[in-house]
Amino acid sequence: MNRLQERYQKEIVPSLEKELGLGNVMQVPGIKKVVVNIGVGDALDNGKLLDEAVRDLTKITGQKPLINKSKRNIANFKLRMGSAVGTSVTLRGYKMWSFLDRLMNVALPRVRDFRGVSPNSFDGRGNYTLGITEQLVFPEVNYDEVSKIRGLEVTIVTTARDDESGRALLRDLGMPFKEETANG
């Protein structure tokens, strides 16, 4: 069992139950899955870029990613239906907890000029989406092998019913949210 998952079960569940005023342990919000996604629009011109994105995402998550294909034709972008436009991984179980632990404790502090993540990126149902501007913040990615700096998107899907419950869950897990200040 991962140390973050152990902390969640032993410390965070009881504290969230009290904080949110829940009557049952099963109502405490948890994390269902984490989806990590890299969009590679440049792959239309250069197929090698998609292979590099797949390699980076495999190293970051420890799981082979799925290649996403376009669903429709868009003439302005020279995009044909069925063209590879990105890659994504859905993490569950041990790999999900391990990835979250590395994300919050290793990768995010390595972001240049990091002052916290936005507390407003919730979708209304307690799910949180975070954009990372470069894949190099993860120590698994070798700087010398990277030909193009590419961003990635991390979506944390929770069982929370609303944004407040989801925010409380992620805050207790250790997500470094920006502090709300009076002068902006």
Image (spheres, rainbow, N blue to C red):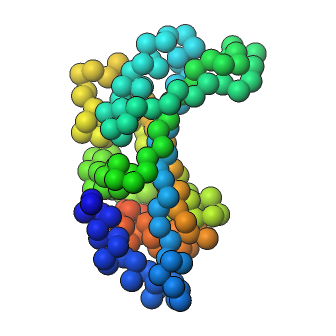
Viewer-proximal residue among 2 and 165? 2
Residue 139 on image: x %, y % = 24, 39
Residue 60 in view in this figure: no
Q: Residue at x 50, y 35 (%)?
A: 88
Q: Residue at x 47, y 62 (%)?
A: 31
Q: Is residue 169 above or below residue 85?
A: below
Q: Quadrant of the N terminus?
A: bottom left
Q: Is residue 113 above or below residue 83?
A: below
Residue 182 on image: x %, y % = 49, 74
Within the image, what quadrant is residue 58 found in? top left
Q: Is residue 133 above or below residue 114?
A: above
Within the image, what quadrant is residue 60 found in? top left
Residue 42 in view in this figure: yes
Viewer-proximal residue among 32 and 151? 32
Is residue 13 left or right of 21 when viewed as pictured? left
Q: How many marks?
A: 0
Residue 87 on image: x %, y % = 50, 30
Q: Residue at x 47, y 81 (%)?
A: 25
Q: Residue at x 56, y 73 (%)?
A: 164
Viewer-proximal residue among 110 and 100? 100
